[in-house]
Amino acid sequence: MLKLRLKRCGRKQPIYRIVAIDVRSRREGRDLRKVGFYDPIKNQTFLNLPAVLYFIEKGAQPTGTVYDILKKAEIFKEKTLS
């Protein structure tokens, strides 16, 4: 089973990549694909929309925080319209 989850990149300041990863992998483990990033300090988000929609259609479950990020970006509205 796949999950869309955050993977920490920043050492001093937290910056996270949004990745598609197997459930059995640890947080910093090997990811299948990077689908975006999230900077909580600057409140910036970059998403690769086709990749996110692809993994959601394949059954990937976003974690709670990633779900909130995707909801703010209105991914689920686009998915229902198309």
Image (spheres, helix red, strand yellow):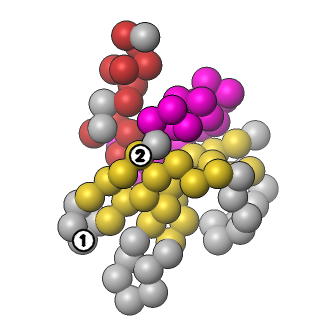
Say which quadrant the C terminus sits in: top left
- Does residue 56 belong to the magenta stretch? yes
Contact, mark 2 vs mark 1 (Cβ under 8 Å): no
Say which label, 2 or 1, has the lower sequence index.
Answer: 1
Residue at coordinates 43% horizontally, 19% vertically from top-left?
Answer: 79
- The mark closer to the camera, 2 or 1, is 2
What amino acid is labelled 2 in the image? Leu
Q: Secondary structure at mark 1?
A: loop
Q: What residue is shown at x 21% (from left), y 67% (from top)?
A: 42
Question: Magenta span covers which residues?
Answer: 49-68
Q: Mark 1 sits on what residue?
A: 41
Q: Which residue extends farthest left? A: 42
**Image quarter hosting the N terminus:** top right
Amino acid on which disc 1 is placed: Ile
Residue at screen point 61% across, 24% down: 57
Residue at image position (38%, 30%) is 75
Mark 2 residue element = strand
Query: Residue most toward the bottom?
Result: 12
Residue topped by disc 2: 47
- The answer to which image quadrant residue 59 occupies is top right
Q: Position of residue 13 (x, y in %)?
A: 34, 82
Q: Is residue 26 found inside the magenta-colored segment of the image?
A: no
Identify the residue at the far top of this view: 81
| Drawn side of residue 1 relative to residue 44, left or right | right
Where is 57 relative to 31, above or below?
above
Quarter assignment of residue 10: bottom left
Q: Which is the main secondary structure of the residues drawn in magenta? A: helix
